[in-house]
Amino acid sequence: MFEDTILVVDDETPNLQKLQRTFVHRYRVLAASNGHDALRLVEKNEGISVIIADQRMPDMTGVDFLRRTLSSLPDAVRIILTGYTDVDVLMEAINSCKVFRYVVKPWDPPDLLMTVERGLEGQRLAIENARIRKELIRRERLARELEIARDIQRYILPPSCPVLKGYQMAVEYTPAREVGGDLYDFHVDPDGSRLQIVIGDVSGKSIPAALYGAVFSGQMGTLFGSPMRPEEKLAFLNRTLLSRYPVQNYIAVAYLHLNLSEGTGSLANGGMPYPYVIRDGEVSQLKASGVPLGLMGETEYDSHAFGLRKGDTLLLLSDGATDAVDPEQRIYDPERFVDSVHRHYLEETSKFVKSLHADIVKFAGGAELSDDVTLMALRRLN
């Protein structure tokens, strides 16, 4: 099977046969004795790589014929054969017909074969360069779209943690790709008496997850002023997502209320990892469970009561914190994560979450994290 097809056009039978013999064992060869027949061959054969046409033909000139092939075969290598030297025809052919070479008769088969091979080499290089240019344009467009998505996400995620009397709070967030699907937000009542925290993980990654998370965050923000309990808010959001946004994504969400003066709180969980409580060096979990939002309609959620004493740290996380994989395909499982908590829990809160994240990255051994990582710590000081 020949890779390239050559169309040869000449009204003189001996020349046409000579052209066919020159290429027949190297390329698929199509032959025509006039311009109109050649145009019909062009219509039926889209994969023609090279066109060799005699300039002087009775029905149309070689230049006219080549000009009429420009739209259908824009990348073909075009060669003109002529029995006389005509500078004006030469310039017209080069400027208007994308002619690669102008060959004067009588021509030598090896020389013409070499000319064709050089033309094909240049054609392949030009096609590859065009492909690279298109790919660069595509990547530049994608980079711009990612930049826009990052800007949207930066706008959605809080720029900093709230300053709370008697508490320290810190967040460490790292998307697995340019933009991520994890989300979080907080709200402190105007009188400073109550803190609300939401942390979530949209299924999928990159731009679709980030944009779906943006939709959810907008819905979530409207509920901060609502008197509903955490479990009621999750049920409400679940119904809203299913009815208004029937897409394949779902969102795991943990939502909690905390009375800051008393240190008592309520947690509802829809598919997020169980939060941890660190007390006097002991690590336990708030085992509240539930179905992620956006999967099933009319889902009910439970409430889990908890309390924070002086020195206690509440640690919320996304599953990317325990899903990292090292070069040997071992998973950074909850046991490794808890071991890291034991080693760093005495550190100041912002350093604590940074150290936990650093241990995850170190375990991964420089490999790209498989999922977004969010770590949120709240420590009661008095």
Image (tube, rainbow, N blue to C red):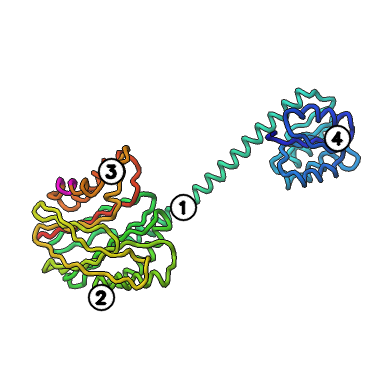
The quarter of the picture where the N terminus appears is top right
In the rendered image, residue 66 lying in the magenta stretch gets the answer no
Q: Position of residue 97 (x, y in %)?
A: 76, 41
Question: Mark 3 = which residue?
Answer: 361
- Dividing the picture into quadrants, the one containing residue 200 is bottom left
Amino acid type at image mark 4:
Asp
**Crowdedness near tag 2: few (<14), some (14–19) or many (≥20) residues, C-alpha within 10 Å:** few
Q: Position of residue 68 (x, y in %)?
A: 79, 46
Q: Tags 1 and 3 in contact by the CB under 8 Å rule?
A: no
The answer for how far apart the CA atoms under marks 4 and 2 are is 87 Å
72 and 89: which one is in front?
72
Q: Position of residue 268 (x, y in %)?
A: 24, 67
Upstream in sequence: badge 4 or badge 1:
4
Upstream in sequence: badge 1 or badge 3:
1
> Farthest right residue?
58
Question: Mark 1 = which residue?
Answer: 144
Question: Mark 2 = which residue?
Answer: 228
Q: Is residue 145 above or below residue 368?
A: below
